[in-house]
Amino acid sequence: MSVLRYSGFVAESCARDPALLDSLAADELNRPRAAGEVQELATALADSLTDEAEFMDGLRRLRRRELVRIAWRDLGDVAPLAEVLAELSGLADAAIAASLAFATRSLKPRYGTPRSESGEAQELVVLGMGKLGGRELNFSSDVDLLFVYESPAAVDPLEHNHAVAR
């Protein structure tokens, strides 16, 4: 339990949620997440919730749980630094992808489908810059993102007019 002494965040998180460590099975504290495992958890949140506040709360709980797990592995000398950085970057990627999916699903009925000048549907692309882009995110890193479309985008005026009350 020396980890609790080294990390105020882990100690506070466990005090706020006494079942947190119990919910992190011993194998979760002793192994890295499998490829796509955190993404599946985040995607399940985005797919199962329609209320923005509930989604954000669920995402915050997932983030806290994963940060405690990763910190425990880091401070307990279970995981090498490269693995810790990769897991933190994977967590950020999963949260960003789930947030994008939730926002897209939530906003499309209201604002329509973004389209190029030629009328083709476009998807928003989110690019991770800096430490996230380099897969070197650490516990205190901020996340630098660029949001882009392949070409200038506009919402479909027919969808927009239909969805917005006048």
Image (cartoon, helix red, strand yellow):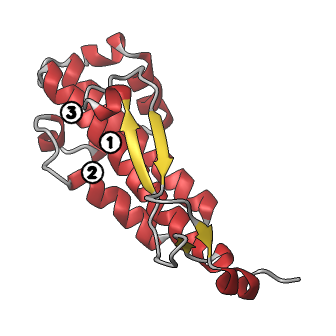
In the rendered image of this protein, does residue 17 appear above or below residue 123? above
In the rendered image of this protein, does residue 74 appear above or below residue 147? above
Residue 66 bears which disc, if any? none
Disc 1, disc 3: CB below 8 Å?
no
Label 1, residues with CA under 10 Å away: few <14, some 14-19, many ≥20: many
Q: Is residue 24 left or right of residue 153?
A: left
Q: Residue at x 25, y 19 (%)?
A: 1
Residue 91 bears which disc, if any? 1
Q: Is residue 125 left or right of residue 117?
A: left
Q: Earlier in the sequence, mark 2 or mark 3?
A: 2
Q: Judge by depth and name the residue closer to the eye, 151 or 90.
A: 151
In the rendered image of this protein, does residue 76 appear above or below residue 41? above
Residue 86 bears which disc, if any? 3
Q: Position of residue 46 (x, y in %)?
A: 44, 65
* C-alpha gap between disc 1 and disc 2: 6 Å
Q: Earlier in the sequence, mark 1 or mark 3?
A: 3
